[in-house]
Image: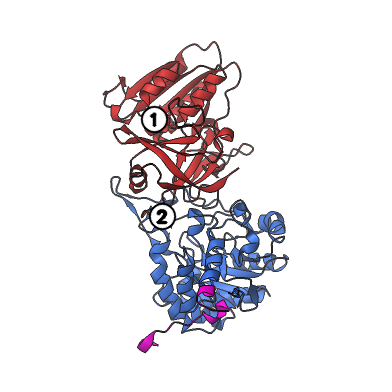
Amino acid sequence: MVTPDLAVEVGTVRLKNPVLTASGTFGYGLEFQPFLDLNALGGLVTKGLSPRPRKGNPPERIVETPAGMLNAIGLQNVGVDAFVREKLPKLRAFDTAIVANVFGETEAEYLEVCEKLDAAPGVAAIELNLSCPNTECGGMIFGNDAASLGAITRACRRATKLPLWVKLSPNVTDIRETARAAEAEGADAVTLVNTFVGMAVDVERRRPVLANVSGGLSGPAIRPLAVWMTWQVRRAVAIPIVGMGGIMTARDALEFLIAGATAVQTGTVNFVTPGSAVTVARDLASWLAAHGVASVREIVGTLDAGRAS
Amino acid sequence: MMSDFATKVVRNVDLGRGSFLIEFEDPGLGAAMRPAQFFMIGAPGGDVLLRRPFSVCGLPGTFDDATPGTLQVLYRVYGRATSLLASLGPGASLQVLGPLGRGFEAPPAGSDVLLVAGGIGSAPFPAFLRELARERRPASMIYGARTAAELPLLDWFKEHASRVAVTTEDGSAGTKGRVTLPLAEALAAPRPRPLHLYACGPNPMLKAVARLAVDAGVKCDLSLEAPMACGFGVCLGCVVPVKDGATGESRFERVCVEGPVLPASRMAW
């Protein structure tokens, strides 16, 4: 049996396989070295980076829900300077795509982080977090409507020559509108979806479980929603899609690829089984081989929706 | 060295009243593990997504009647994850990540040792008591819970601690009241030698214990519990506020990596 070709191109970013790890679920990558070979990843997306370190929200920050979890971490991170100084030099040593996730409270903060990353060797792409639901100004205000998302994408486009991926919020009426705005303003790809806003109630205390009141829902519970949005966006824009939402296995990843994603990100599963991103890539190769598919690229966007298409 | 390993249940002993002591095959980690370090444990095939954190309760040599080559974890059935765990019999598969976190350190030479446990928070103390016994360091214990049903391994502790003061909120065992009652007495008594406290239990109890210890100028290490998704420092779900040693400002540290054992004097609750 021929070994299938797993390489994909997300715009100009070449990935050795289509499996990346999602922002906020993979630390700065180095923490996972006991569990997997970082060289075996298509890429990794860093924890969201802000101009200065952030303390994050008070606890409780997480709670498990049916087939998922709510989190309200509040974008705790070391700040872009510490990332460039302490993490990036170590990450550069690995043969995998380093995607830096960026967020700010103002447009100026987004630009500041983009410019600093632009000057730092070793970053393969920037992913703009315009969709974090857990901070007052952590991106959602920019990501909730097409006009403001377009404006910040345009500004960041000018601030960096790096490939620009725009991470979309699912907490919108029509995700195709924000996807189109990102494409129109120069995004090289869209990544979707971020978490869904949700809440859990402690019934005995009649209080929200999370100190932040609401949190972002992730995990298998959101997978059908995310696959549907991937399929919607595939028919709305021409730029590549990086899909995510509750991917636990290679079969889950294939749902997104078939629905039109060029690559995928694994998220919550990295907490559950820290070596799983590599397992997903390996099992994807096995599936392709078993189905006589020479390249994963032959699978992307091949959904047969019957009369609906 | 931390690893993610598949193992098998050897025994899952029902201690009664909702408490269980589960034994699983040790792939060789026990010898290097510290009391109060923990594992993230999951049972494949259930409808529980995240693993749950459990202190190691028994290391090699802790329980005389343990199956050789196993480790023991004490748990109380509380929700879906622990119900699933309680349903497992010998030979069932477990997925275990660990050892995780920083455990108890040995008490300073020449100090007296007092352990304070609240309910299932007694879990890290058997391994610690046996270690102290091997070093010929006697330790007394205060063991409290809401009710007598929530004092697992009480007889074992009575056998292995030099003294156990029991409290229950409903008076069904020991003195009626909370652990802070005998603790305040112990802290008020004259101390010929420095006292070192180790406490584990629910957060409200730990806060009260920490306050008493800090006020009395007594060193106290807390083994904290927090909801956590990963257990190895990346989800940032399990943070607690602590005072920065240099600046005194409050910041968040991860129970899973900087803890679970943190000094009471550093807490910024």
Residue indicated by mark 1: B118
Residue at screen point 59% across, 80% down: A186
Q: Which chain is blue?
A: A
Q: Secondary structure at mark 1?
A: strand
Q: Which residues are magenta?
A: A288-309
**Rendered colour, chain B:** red
Residue topped by disc 2: B49
Q: Residue at x 39, y 53 (%)?
A: A64
- Locate residue A184, reporting x and y percent: 55, 83
Label 2: which secondary element: loop
Kindly tell me whether residue B88 is visible in this rendering.
yes
Q: Quadrant of the N terminus of chain B?
A: top right
Q: Is residue A201 above or below residue A163?
A: above
Q: Is residue B147 visible?
A: no
The x, y position of residue A143, in whole percent, is: 49, 71
Question: Which comes before the other along the chain, label 1 or label 2?
Answer: 2
